[in-house]
Amino acid sequence: MHETLAKLAPQQVFLIQGNRNTFESLFNDLKNNSSSIEGEMLSRFTMEDANNIVSFNLQRGAGSWYVVYFDVFVNDASQVLLKTLEEPNEGVNIVFITPHPYLIPQTIRSRARLMSIDLQSEIPSYLSSKKDIVEYVKEVFGDDSVEASIRRAEATVFLDQLE
């Protein structure tokens, strides 16, 4: 995966729809191929985490990677990141990985290259009709313990994969 991202130069900011395994795979790949890498696995991406990326961007040079996985993006963090994402230092690469890219503010999404890891293999083969798909989405994403916005985002991601 590192090679795929490296080929996309001059793009330096990536938003990958993925899971914790995606993070671990990319982070380990980068560790083997880069001299300067930092990474974090978070449940919530906050202003403090955004400040860490800004500091990383200011202190590091070419070939540096910052990879962060998160489930939820706190909207206030976007204001801290805007300038860094618009003009990252030359050679500094920032990768956001989340299963819910549609929950990230548009101002952040517009400054990153959105990539999706193929989840097609996770879609059960028995889903043949729209009714089957809707029932499956209700069953899988209908847990009341999850916030409604996250359920909608998960369902949207799933339906995007079906398209």
Image (spheres, helix red, strand yellow):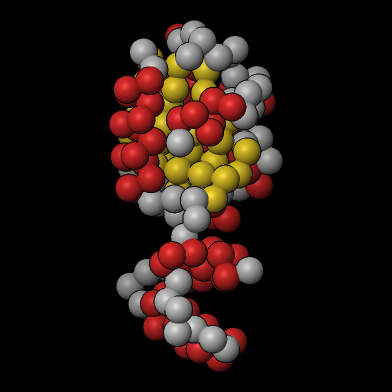
Q: Residue at x 59, y 87 (%)?
A: 130
User: Residue 143 at what x, y percent from top left?
Assistant: 36, 77
Q: Position of residue 116 (x, y in %)?
A: 54, 50
Number of numbered discs visible in the structure rendering: 0
Looking at the picture, how far across and down is residue 58, in whole percent? 50, 12
Name the residue at 49% across, 33% down: 95
Quarter of the image with the N terminus in it: top left
Residue 139 visible in image? yes
Residue lying at 59% horizontally and 27% vertically, measured from the top left: 7
* 145 w.r.t. 82: above or below: below
* Nearer to me, 147 or 122: 122
Can residue 138 be seen here? The reply is no
Residue appearing at x 38%, y 36% in the figure: 26
Q: Quadrant of residue 99?
A: bottom left
- Position in image of residue 114 (x %, y %): 60, 44
Which of the image's four quarters has the C terminus?
bottom right
Q: Quadrant of residue 112?
A: top right
* In the image: residue 23, left or right of residue 113: left
Q: Is residue 154 above or below residue 103?
A: below
